[in-house]
Image (tube, rainbow, N blue to C red):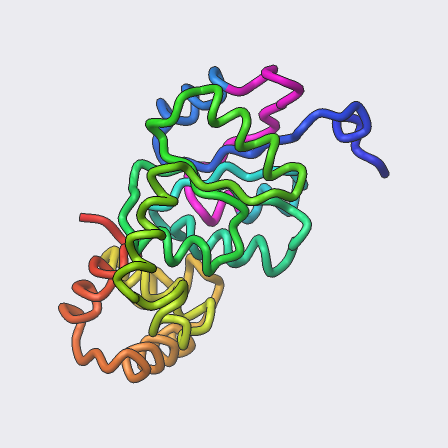
Amino acid sequence: MENIASAEGKIRVLVADDHAIMRDGIRALIHGKEGIEVIGEAEDGRMAVELVEKLRPDVVLMDIAMPSLNGLEATRQIKRDHPEIHVLVLTMYDHEEYVRQVLATGASGYVLKRAAAGELVSAIQAVARGEAVLSPAVTRVLINEYLRGEKSPGDEDDRLTPREREVLQLIAEGHTSREIARMLNLAVKTVQAHRTSLMQKLDLHDRGELIKYAIQKKIIEL
């Protein structure tokens, strides 16, 4: 059945951020502006994926650093299952490592949280039309990277499966194999197999190296 809000021309937005104050602030900034309607909020990437299935928004405003499932992996899953849904990453980070990984996930845009309200509203409208959007500061990062001749989006962790990336984040966050099995609805032996596989692919040998890798690759934050 056709969604009434979409039929009325409203842009239906899901906000994913692990800070309630930030979600409230974003809602206050954009809800009702230029035909934008906030239809739901998620406090982590896993909830964002679940709400996308339930609500089918037009645009997902996605933070990067979130517990349980980070915004990068959530975006990968959303774009894999629902390529028609646009993801606009909204983050405080303009580090080139984040920019690379966001572009590799299939996200439609990258806007910094320090952007003015008008810039955010314009970005949401643009990605809803199928356009790509980058904050000026992010564009400068990409230009500098190009001038230095650095690698394009995507890096060695592309060898990992989506499930291995999930397990990697949860291990780095300190969860046990039994806890991860419960969170992902897997057998403990399956979780252990994923752990062994990802550590072999990344040439990591213990939990300490795994955590260091996760921090370096911005999978988790300190």
Q: Which residue in the rendered view is the most extreme toward the front?
A: 147
Q: Position of residue 153 (x, y in %)?
A: 40, 63
* Position of residue 1 in the picture relative to residue 105 (left or right): right
- Residue 66 in sight: no
Q: Is residue 35 magenta?
A: yes
Q: Position of residue 112 (x, y in %)?
A: 37, 35
Image quadrant in which you'd find residue 127: top right
The residue nearer to you, when weighing 113 against 96, is: 96
Range of residues picked out in magenta:
30-48
* Position of residue 97 in the picture relative to residue 211 (left or right): right
- Residue 184 in sight: yes
> Residue shown at 59%/55% (left/top)?
79
Q: Is residue 186 magenta?
A: no
User: Considering the image in quadrants, where does the N terminus appear?
Assistant: top right
Above or below, 208 relative to 36: below
> Residue shown at 42%/77% (left/top)?
190
Q: Position of residue 178 (x, y in %)?
A: 34, 65
Above or below, 99 relative to 208: above
> Residue shown at 50%/52% (left/top)?
75
The residue nearer to you, when weighing 210 against 135, is: 135
The residue nearer to you, when weighing 196 against 201, is: 201
Image quadrant in which you'd find residue 34: top right
Q: Position of residue 182 (x, y in %)?
A: 42, 60
> Residue shown at 37%/26% (left/top)?
22
